[in-house]
Image (spheres, helix red, strand yellow):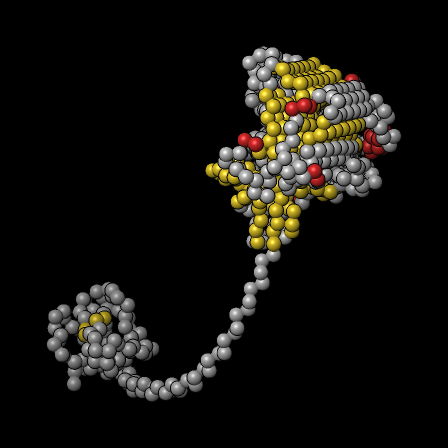
Amino acid sequence: MRHAPYIFIVYVSIMWSFATNGYALPAEGIVTAGSASISSAADNLIVTQTTANAAISWQRFNIAPTEAVRFIQPDSHSITLNRVHGADPSHILGALSATGRVFLVNPNGILFGSGAQVNVAGLVASTLNITDSDFMAGNYVFSEAGSGGIINQGTINADHGHVALLGANVRNDGVILARLGTVVLAAGNAITLDLAGDGLLNVTVDEGALNTLIENGGMIKADGGEVVLSSRAASDLLPGVVNNTGIIQALTMENHNGVIRLLGGHQNGAVNVGGTLDASAPNGGDGGMIETSGAHVRIADDAIITTHSTQGKTGTWTIDPEDFTIGSGATDNISGAALSASLVTNSVTIYTDPGSDATVPGTPPVSSLYTSTTGNGDIHVNEAVSWTATPSTTTLTFNALGDVNINEAITATNGNIVACCGQNVNVDAAVTTVNGSVLLEAGNNVNVNAAMTTTDGNIALCAGNNINVAAEMTLTNGSNIPSQSLGLTPGLLLHAGTNGTGPGAAGGTVIFDPLIPATVTKSSAVPTSVTINYNPVSYAAPTDYSPDFILTGGVALNQHMLVFPVGGKTYDGTTDVTLTALQDSPAGVGLVAGAGSTAAFDTIDIGTDKTITFTGYTLSGANSADYALPTTCCAPIVGKTTGSIIAAPTPTPTPTPTPTPTPTPTPTPTPTPTPTPTPIPIPETGVTPYEVTPGANTSGGAFTSAYRNIGLSNGASAQFPQENTWIPEVIPFPIPDQLSSLARPPVSFTPVPDAPYTAPIYLPKQERE
């Protein structure tokens, strides 16, 4: 492996930081959030937690070889945060176990020694801090990396769970096990964890740190789960480094495909791949996914990388650098021999696309990671690649921002070759497949300057501009076109000029060297044809390509002139557009929008010659067989044309009407105040109840009381039909049969006009007049 020279120095400094501390059980623990109790006896310490989450602050947190710390928690999802506020690193040399999950945060460093035995539902060991408030709220945001590192030399087991080691420098020399779970080694200055449940864990390195380093020299196993090694530097000048010399295994298990990701950062990160990366499926199912991404990715010749499946489909290995060179030079990314060996059991995809890291949700999540544009985004094949895939087909895919330059031969048996690029595909060395197909698509030109030979497969060459054929092309199909035909049109497809807008040489076309005809042979009933889609000089003068071919066995030649749909609209803030006609209106052909058809601009912005992609449109008419729509050949397969979005006209302002004068309101007369009734004098003595029997005194009888209060009891009622009736107080209904106590302060009452009012009342003493 090629390692940066400072890496060993960093590792030694990490080890030195652990050499000065004594060992003892965790000490001086204080519960700062949630509910938990701490007890210890001899060499054992027990934390009993009664809430789902709890946080404890410790002066120090160590476990000697003969000691054990146990966390008793409500369930496997419970979490205990253990924060060390002292100045010493933590030494875990004995046993650590938990019902649930344990977070250990120590900015001074954490060492799991060679005798450490950790058995938990989940473990997070971090030199980055997390606040109690974030922790209790479920916001697992770690920041401000301490000076210490994290080293594991022991055995950490989290079955169906997760293990996350977070810091600026993290190294594993021991064993980490997380069956059907997730293992994360992440370096940075700010890291966010998302506990997705079921053992899955998503990680985002939000902010880089200086000289970040992730190294695995031990064994990491997460069968049916995911392993992520991610390092991000704080400066584009100082790389985030990921080194693997050990074994990382994530086999397919219980229909869960394993995922392995080594991520060095998309600006100046370095990923050095040695040892073993194994996401295979030896016990059934499809192979998993391996991704090695960074600005600089180097693969050791002795690296073992496999996504092989014995019964299903082989998985994929994605390599994502800034530029990529296949060769044996000191600065090359992988040798031809190493790539050839990997292709026996893996489909390999090499990306050099621009953009930012992004995570695509899934179970487990799959990342789509891209590199920066500080390089050209080119891929160079500078050393021969040759393989025979077994037992299932594998595919070598080049996906480049810039050019794909095939400078040395590529030979595949039971294998496919795919190149999709933004600029040119230059075939300057032989490309040969047996029981496999070739797909080359360029945003500009496909230049065939060396022989292309395919037996029992298909060839598709697609270009935004020209396809230039200056070498022999030979396609021979026998009795079988295998499944590895990439879904291409059977036989030979040449599809040029998709960046054009109509007929004319400037639009791009297919150009043959007249002295080197292409040979296509069919020796069975398997459908095989030659299809050419091109831009003609004019629709009235189609090109005759038949002299450029030697066709045997009944191979048909199908020629189609490209026609471009017309699309445009007034700006409305969306990308949607409707295609209604064809550019230049060729005779005898029309555009048909099928059910579910779509068309959209690439952006919502105003402009001309903007790219439109479309699906679901077809051609109809008497001459439709002579034409074809421009489409892409690499996924996603969509139609392509151009159109304009014009600015919406400025609306004529509506004149502001003259306001109608507001009439002066008529003053509202001041109401005459209601006179206050004269209070009835209260006698000083002689309060005697006056009995009123039900049914009596109901025909206009009048009661006059010399006292302030009047009322009724024992079910009697009184009606007051007059407006000026005044009752000083009404006792709430219903009243008890016994007499109620008198209320001295007067209470005014206004009856409903001209309507009887019935209320329970009580007369303390009656005076008839």
The image quarter in which residue 210 lies: top right
Q: Residue at x 61, y 46 (%)?
A: 643
Which quadrant does the C terminus fall into?
bottom left
Q: Is residue 523 above or below residue 94?
A: above
In the image shown, does 611 or 94 lie closer to the viewer?
611
Q: Residue at x 16, y 73 (%)?
A: 692
Q: Nearer the viewer, residue 293 or 588?
A: 588
Q: Quadrant of residue 59?
A: top right
Kindly identify the residue that appears in the image at 31 percent across and 87 percent down. Answer: 675
When the figure is inspected, residue 765 is found, relative to residue 147, above or below; the finding is below
Residue 234 position, x and y percent, is 78, 42
How many dots with numbers? 0
Q: Nearer the viewer, residue 349 or 81?
A: 349
Which residue is situated farthest in the front direction here?
Answer: 541
Q: Residue at x 69, y 36 (%)?
A: 508
x and y, in percent, of residue 600 in the image: 58, 44
The residue lying toward the viewer, choosing from 235 and 110, is 235
Position of the N terminus by quadrant: top right
Residue 716 seen: yes
Q: Position of residue 346 (x, y in %)?
A: 68, 20
Quarter of image, res 281 = top right
Task: Examine the rendering and report whether any part of residue 97 can be seen.
Answer: no
> In the figure, is residue 12 to the left or right of 538?
right
Q: Percent x, y for residue 124?
A: 67, 34
| 375 is higher (above) or lower (below) than 664 | above
